[in-house]
Amino acid sequence: SELIRESPEEGRYYTLRASAWWARQEEEQALEDYNKAIDLGYDDPDAYSSRGLFHAALGNYDQAIADYTAALKQGADDDAPYVNRAAVYMTQQKFDEALADYTKAIEVEPNKPSTYQQRAIAHKLRGSAEDAIADFDAALEIDAEYIPALMGRGFVWFQQEQFDRAIADFARVIEIQPEAVQAYNNRGFNRQQLGDYANSLADYNKAIELAPEFALAYQNKAWLRATSDVVEFRDGAAAMDAATKACELNNYEHAPDVKSLAAACAEAGA
């Protein structure tokens, strides 16, 4: 602010103050300073790219896209405007546009696993599992321990009913990050699809141990206990306990939790 008082026509100072506003989570003031900087003729690509972030955070998606586009026209030489514009397109479910931007970003910076992983998600949502797997593979070639790619690929394997491969990816996540709650739950669910109920139940219990308020693990445990085709794993009382906990955690507002409770009641004869 002192620099601005001394040189009120220096746009760069407004961008610096905007960053400080943003750090204080005062988005409107940050956006106002970026507007001022650009109005004063400060046309550095970072000014547009940064203002685009603020617009995106505030839900002003068309303005965000316009700013990322302006940053590119002003000669931005990094991948950020492409990646950020792609993220906005993803929010708008414009997957073709997002894919094009992620591809451009990879051309600019080919060694970032995160960009391949994000493009993989765009492929998945567009309905191309094969292309999604290829991009998850590419991310993992760059960083074999990149957990978002392992988690993403594991989920696609599950959707393709390749449960063994899904289990392998979630197991790898657990090796890297032993407290990865979602990975235990996901591995347990895939094990359940293969009839490996003992290990599936162990995974659900581990997820619950690590995160006692993780409703999905309780729900999955309830379904296993209520519907297993192996008698020794059927336990109506345990199913009711798990399903009730899932319902309570979500205030009885999540239909799959309530369905699991209904199945548990049926098994228990309640």
Image (spheres, grey):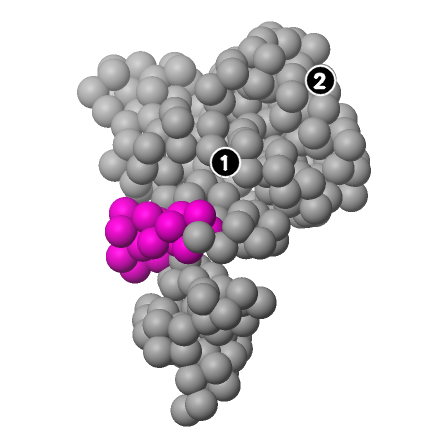
Q: Nearer the viewer, residue 135 or 206?
A: 206
Q: Quadrant of residue 22?
A: top left
Q: Nearer the viewer, mark 1 or mark 2?
A: 1
Q: Quadrant of residue 23?
A: top left
What are the residue bounds of the magenta stretch? 199-214
Marks 1 and 2, how far apart in space? 30 Å
Name the N-terminal-most of marks 1 and 2: 2
Along the line of sight, which residue is nearer the eye, 72 or 186? 186
Residue hosting label 1: 170
Identify the amino acid type marked 2.
Lys
Q: Looking at the rendering, which quadrant does residue 6 occupy? A: top left
The residue drawn where x is 50% and y is 36% is 170
Magenta: main secondary structure equals helix
Residue most extreme to the left: 2
Q: Is 209 a magenta residue?
A: yes
Q: Which part of the image, by quadrant, shows the C terminus?
A: bottom left
Residue under the image location 47 percent in, 19 percent down: 145
Number of other residues with Cα within 10 Å of mark 1, as a class: few under 14, some 14 to 19, many 20 or more: many
**Residue 191 part of the magenta segment:** no
Which is nearer the eye, 120 or 13?
A: 120
Where residue 115 appears, x then y in whole percent?
60, 22
Can residue 166 be seen here? The reply is yes
Which residue is disc 2 drawn over?
A: 104
Q: Which element type, helix, strand or loop, lies under badge 2? A: helix
**In the rendered image, is residue 76 in sight?**
no
Q: Is mark 1 on a helix, strand or loop?
A: helix
Residue found at x 45% / y 65%: 233
